Amino acid sequence: MKLHLGCGQKYLEGYVNIDFSLNSHTVQESSIADIRCDILDLNYPAESIKEIRLHHLFEHFPRPVACALLASWYSWLRPGGVIHIEVPDFEKTARTVLNHFTSFEEKAVAERHLFGTHEAGWAVHCEGYTPKLLQSFIEKFGFRTIKIKKNNWKGTHNFELIAKKIKLDIQKHTKEGFKVITENFLKGFLLDNSESEYKLLSVWLNIFDNQIEKTWAS
C-alpha cells in the first residue's frame, strides 16, 4: 500500500489518496480523496506501507506533532520503505521577503508561502524548512535521504526530499525510544536551562505523547 496524505485535488494513481472531509474545506468544492478523515487520526499496521507521500502538508504540523508523525510513519513503513515530503523552501522564500528590490506583490506571495493561506484553521504553517534542516530532522527519526529536488511554482520556492526507512537500534525503534529522540531534538529549541523552559519542554513532550498514542502502528 502507498499513501498520498493531504491529496487536495491532486489524485495519484496507485496510491490511497487521503484528505479532510469536504466540510473542513472552505475553498475546495469537491473531493477526489479515497479516504476522507483527519490525517492526525490515521493508524496502520506495523510495516504494512510501502511509501508515504505528502506535498505541502508537513509544514502545517507543530514541531512535537511532526516528531510523533515521523516516528509513527517509521512504524508503518516496511524496511526500505520510502517517504516523500515536499515543503516550501524557507530560506529562499525569506530572501524574497528581505530583498529590497522585490515588489510588494512578490513579497506578499512569499509571506503567504511562509505562513500559510489562512482561509481555515488548518491553513497555517507551523514550521519553516530548508533542505539541510529537514534532512537533519528526518534522519534523527530513522530515515536516510536519497534525493533532494528543488522547484519553483508560480513564483514560490519549494523542495522535495525523498528518503527511505533504515534499520534503527531496537531500543530506539519503540515509542519510548522515539520519545528520547524527540526530547533531545526539542531541547535544541530551548532558550536556556531555566525551569520555565523545561516546563515548556514538558508541554511539548505531552503533545508528542498524545499524538503518537493515536498514530503509532497498530
Image (spheres, rainbow, N blue to C red):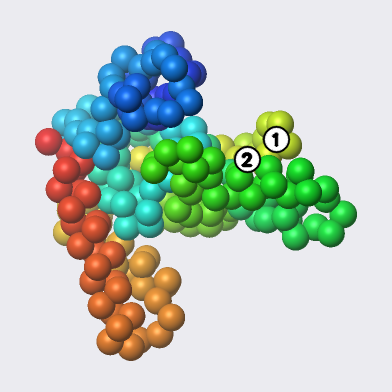
Q: Are marks 2 and 1 in contact (CB under 8 Å)?
A: yes
In this view, 184 is above or below 123: below
User: Crowdedness of circle 2 by 10 Å Cα count: few (<14), some, many (20+)?
Assistant: many
Per the image, the residue denoted by label 1 is 152
Q: Which badge, 2 or 1, comes first in the chain's sequence? A: 1
Q: Which residue is pictured at 48% across the width and 48% down the height?
A: 125
In this view, 92 is above or below 217: below
User: Does residue 84 show up?
Assistant: no
Residue 94 left/right relative to 126: right
Q: Which residue is pictured at 28% across the width and 87% down the height?
A: 195
* Most foreground residue, 1 or 59: 59
Residue type highlighted by circle 2 = Asn
Q: Position of residue 197 (x, y in %)?
A: 33, 80
Q: Quadrant of the C terminus?
A: top left
User: Does residue 209 show up?
Assistant: yes
In this view, 16 is above or below 187: above
Q: Quadrant of the N terminus?
A: top left
Look at the numbered disc 2 and give the secondary structure of its residue: strand
Q: Position of residue 71 (x, y in %)?
A: 28, 48
* Most foreground residue, 164 or 19: 19
Q: Position of residue 212 (x, y in %)?
A: 20, 49
* Most foreground residue, 129 or 154: 154
Q: Which residue is pictured at 39% across the width and 41% down the height?
A: 122
Look at the numbered disc 1 and give the secondary structure of its residue: strand
* Most foreground residue, 9 or 73: 9
Q: Position of residue 15 (x, y in %)?
A: 37, 17
Per the image, the residue denoted by label 2 is 158
User: Crowdedness of circle 1 by 10 Å Cα count: few (<14), some, many (20+)?
Assistant: few
- The label number, if any, that marks residue 144 in the structure image: none
Q: Quadrant of residue 97?
A: bottom right
Residue type highlighted by circle 1 = Asn
